[in-house]
Image (cartoon, helix red, strand yellow):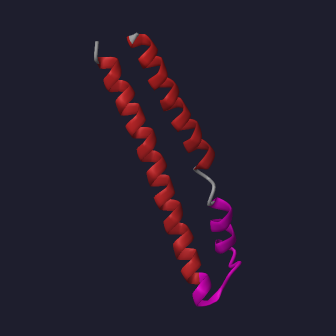
Amino acid sequence: MADLDHEAMRAVAQRIQRLSDEHWWVLDPSCRLMASDAWVGPAGACFDAQVRADQRELRGVLAQAVHSANQRLSAAQDTP
């Protein structure tokens, strides 16, 4: 039964990694457009700052989710 639980945990960790990989770049097109001055003026500057902050936050959350899943998987491997 422990092997089944470990395999389920491994599958979850792999799924979290795949989701992270799929979504890591999701805000890049908006950031590239803003770097090309797609929207200018005060509202453009505000949007640029917000989209870049959102990108940092998203990547931080994704990295933390992957790290947490891998830590839990590693801890489960150490437990008999």
Q: Position of residue 55 (x, y in %)?
A: 53, 61
Outermost residue, front side: 1
Outermost residue, left side: 79
The residue depicted at 38 percent of the width and 12 percent of the height is 2
Is 77 drawn above or below residue 15 in the view shown? above
Is 8 contained in the magenta span? Answer: no
Q: Position of residue 22 (x, y in %)?
A: 63, 44
Most frequent secondary structure within the magenta stretch = helix
The range drawn in magenta is 28-44
Q: Is residue 29 left or right of residue 56?
A: right
The residue depicted at 53 percent of the width and 30 percent of the height is 14
The residue depicted at 38 percent of the width and 38 percent of the height is 68
Outermost residue, bottom side: 41
Is 43 contained in the magenta span? Answer: yes
The residue depicted at 44 percent of the width and 43 percent of the height is 65
Q: Nearer the viewer, residue 70 or 41?
A: 70
Quadrant assignment for the N terminus: top left
Quadrant assignment for the C terminus: top left
How many callouts does the rendering have? 0
